Image (cartoon, helix red, strand yellow):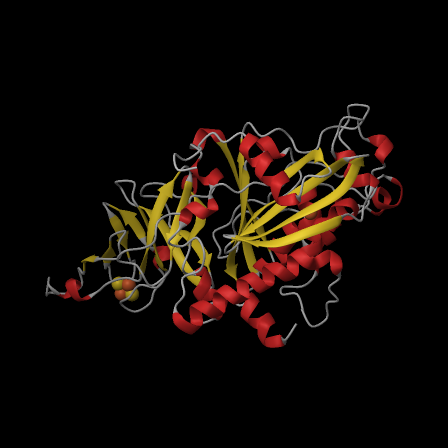
Amino acid sequence: MRSKDSDDLVRVGPGTAMGALMRQYWLPAAMSAEVKPDGAPLRLMLLGEQLIAFRDSAGRIGVMDHRCPHRCASLFLGRNEEGGLRCIYHGWKYDVEGNCVDTPNLADPEFKNRIKAKAYKTVERNGLVWVYMGERQAAPPPLPLIEATLLPEAEVTINFVQRECNYLQALEGDIDTSHFGFLHAGGISPDDVPDDSLFRFTVTNRAPDYHVADTPSGTMYAAYREAAPGKTYWRFANFMMPFWTQTPQGAFASHLHNRAWVPMDDHHTMFVSLTWKQHPPSIGPNKEGRMMPGFKRVFNYLPNETGWYGRWRLERRAENDWLIDRDAQKTGGNFSGIDGIHAQDQAVTESMGPVTDHLFEHLAPSDRMIMATRRCLLQAARALAKDGTMPPGVDDPQIMHAVRSGDFITEARLGWRDAYDREMREAVRPLKMAAE
Ligand code: FES
Ligand SMILES: [Fe+2]
């Protein structure tokens, strides 16, 4: 990879190619519950910009540059009261749209009409606060129709987890399928797994073949292995522009979930996970009915703090070597020695450093999905930079809707696209749109 390509892929601040691409899309930025009416403003780092979010007395959300447009004191310190946020320096006050509504240190009551805070469009839907940071502030594009984001709040589990590295290497963990049989399941033998579990195939053949293709909304792969004579075991996964993924571990028919890797800045990423509550656990117990080593499913958080990087941090982090347990690694049946699938992914991707040095890598045939996804992102960013070509899904959000991942078995003679289409027709779709 050329160093220019690498830079264009990973840098997300204002004025960068990928930053411009990301700014075309609505970004899931916070949980609704994180911002309370008349409560303390929340520091929000998004695409390298220091923002604050607050909810006014009427319940409306504002997201704006944290600097007061008067003399740049931070509005994080502001008083959130009576329908707006008042800067504590000279008392200027802003509503959620950034309008200056009061300048009590000035005699001229008209002066405020010349002042506007740098506010971004926001929308709340199903428990998430979305922010649009692009140029079309007057008439932003529609919200994305990503399936799990349309589920009512009571039917979806939302988790945020901060990852201390660039969004790309974090996201690539989700589409790097051949790590599953090692990082997560390297210590599991096929004999440990119940006979009727599809997971058995993952630990029987750890070097599957792949198909990779571009799709209308991003990229897709299908990893496949022989399940039995005349039968194929499939694992499908997706990348959707500009930072969404769907992973293959789970029964395709009910695996309704979406995962976003939202860049906070070049070195920090907020993982936003949305999972349908009726989605069954993707990996069941072993033959004895016990959870397999390393498969713990909880997030152990540090307490949230108010700093730019203070939200949703995990206890396992670089400073404590992600609490790796060498005994578990050597003799405990846990290949990585780190407990928890998410923690394992977090450890390896953070261990690469804040931004992976792409010139140091040696990509292999097992990384074709990663190569295709980088190409897809770069092409879209460059087309946008060249002539303003809108990237996929911005003005045509419906292409993000009927996209699924997961595993299943078919007759071997079925081609991979046909296998996907057939499974898609049979999938549980609680919110199927009329047009489909
Ligand atoms: S800096 Fe905010 S009112 Fe003066
Ligand atoms: Fe993983």
Q: Residue furthest right?
A: 331
Q: Is residue 311 left or right of residue 354?
A: left
Residue 296's spot in the image, x, y percent? 70, 36
Q: Residue at x 68, y 58 (%)?
A: 368
Q: Quadrant of residue 181?
A: top right
Q: Quadrant of the C terminus?
A: top left
Q: Is residue 298 left or right of residue 151?
A: right
Viewer-side residue, 87 vs 250: 250
Q: Residue furthest front?
A: 413
Residue 171's spot in the image, x, y percent? 60, 54
Q: Is residue 349 left or right of residue 144?
A: right
**Vertical placement of residue 58 versus 134, above or below:** above
Q: Is residue 106 left or right of residue 142?
A: left
Q: Residue at x 67, y 43 (%)?
A: 415
Viewer-side residue, 97 vs 307: 97
Residue 14 visible: no
Viewer-side residue, 142 vs 414: 414
Q: Residue at x 38, y 47 (%)?
A: 143
Viewer-side residue, 363 vs 347: 363
Q: Quadrant of the N terminus?
A: bottom right
**How many numbered discs, if any?**
0
